[in-house]
Image (cartoon, rainbow, N blue to C red):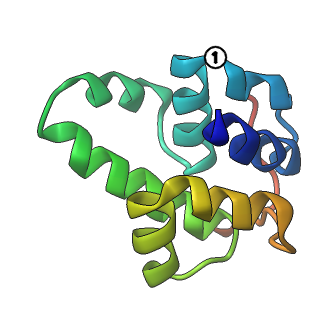
């Protein structure tokens, strides 16, 4: 529940409907897209050890998309993700786009 509350404004800042935070696999897909990766990367979350590596990569991509550094991305977007997404969603962070691009392509 806290993850939905945290992700809703994050998705809204990127121009994606906030209700997509309610659907479990869809919210992971949206996070992968916000991080700037191909949506098929979501499938790798189902592989036990690989999902740890993919989640770290996605956390760093999401941090970069909101102008955050590596330490913030690792500790607050990966290790304590609800807290990090609450900070991004309800804080002053602005979506700068994946890899620094200003707009996000349609999912």
Circle 1 Cα neighbour tier, 10 Å, few/some/many (<14 / 14–19 / ≥20):
few
Q: Image quarter for residue 105?
A: top right
Quadrant location of the N terminus in the rendered image: top right
**In the rendered view, would you say 88 is above or below 24?**
below
- Secondary structure of the residue carrying tag 1 is loop
Which residue is rendered at x = 52% and y = 40% of the image?
32
Residue 39, given in percent of the width and then of the height, sits at 49, 28
The relative height of residue 20 versus residue 105 in the rendered view (above or below) is above
- Compared across the picture, whether 9 is left or right of 83 comes to right
Question: Which of the pair 14/52 is nearer the observer?
Answer: 52
Q: Which residue is mark 1?
A: 23
Q: Quadrant of the C terminus?
A: top right
Compared to residue 43, the image places residue 33 above or below, namely below
Q: Residue at 60% of width from left, 28% of height from top?
A: 27
Find residue 20 and report its image quarter: top right
Q: Specify whether 11 is left or right of 35.
A: right
Q: Is residue 22 visible?
A: yes
Q: Which residue is at a point 51% across and 19% down the rendered structure image?
A: 25
- Image height check: is 60 above or below 16? below
Q: Position of residue 87 (x, y in %)?
A: 72, 67
The outermost residue toward the front is 1
The spot of residue 79 in percent (x, y) is 38, 62
Q: How far from the left and from the top, in percent, is residue 80?
A: 46, 61
Q: Residue at x 41, y 24 (%)?
A: 40
**Could one spot residue 98 in this view of the protein?**
no
User: Where is residue 92, by image quadrant?
Assistant: bottom right
Tell how many labels.
1
Left or right: 70 as drawn, with respect to 52: right
Q: Which residue extends farthest left?
A: 49
């Amino acid at each position: 529940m806290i993850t939905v509350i945290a992700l809703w404004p994050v998705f809204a800042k990127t121009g994606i409907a906030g209700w997509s935070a309610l659907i479990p696999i869809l919210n992971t897909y949206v996070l992968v897209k916000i991080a700037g990766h191909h949506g098929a990367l979501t499938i790798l979350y189902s592989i036990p050890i690989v999902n740890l590596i993919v989640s770290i990569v996605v956390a760093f991509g999401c941090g970069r998309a909101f102008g955050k550094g590596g330490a913030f991305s690792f500790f607050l977007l990966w290790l304590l993700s609800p807290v990090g997404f609450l900070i991004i969603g309800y804080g002053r962070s602005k979506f700068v786009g994946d890899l620094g691009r200003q707009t996000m392509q349609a999912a």
